[in-house]
Image (cartoon, rainbow, N blue to C red):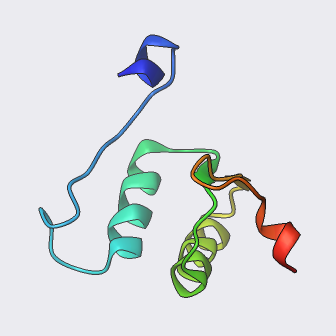
Amino acid sequence: TALEKAGYQVHYEKLDDLPGPFEERLLTFLKGSQSTTLATFAIEDKFFEERIGRVAKKLGVPWTVWESPMFLNPRSAFE
């Protein structure tokens, strides 16, 4: 992928390959990889965003949220 060519380590996981809630699988993966940060694009589903935030908090790692390239205006424009 372009990210890997740019030197980033990338992990893709098909959502329906493993049983259990997504955040539990994410937590297990991040613990196993000894990740020191979590970075995502803005999550438009507030409930899911809170769930991912709890994963970062459980791990004690900073969570970086990038503005979504899918929208013209940032979320802050609607507050």
Residue that extends furthest to the bottom in the rendered view of this protein = 47
Q: Is residue 48 left or right of residue 36?
A: left
Residue 53 in the image, given as x and y percentages of width and height: 63, 73
Q: Is residue 72 left or right of residue 51?
A: right
Q: Residue at x 54, y 79 (%)?
A: 45
Q: For this rendering, which residue is in front, 41 or 50?
A: 41
Residue 6 in the image, given as x and y percentages of width and height: 52, 13
Q: Is residue 48 left or right of residue 41?
A: left
Q: Residue at x 60, y 53 (%)?
A: 41
Q: Is residue 75 left or right of residue 8?
A: right
Residue 10 in the image, given as x and y percentages of width and height: 40, 33
Q: For this rendering, which residue is in front, 16 or 30?
A: 16
Residue 46 in the image, given as x and y percentages of width and height: 61, 83
Q: Residue at x 43, y 43 (%)?
A: 33
Q: For this rendering, which residue is in front, 57 or 14?
A: 14
Count every numbered label the image shows and give the total.
0
Quadrant containing the N terminus in the rendered view: top left
Quadrant containing the C terminus in the rendered view: bottom right
Vertical relation: 10 (above or below) 69: above
Q: For this rendering, which residue is in front, 67 or 48?
A: 67
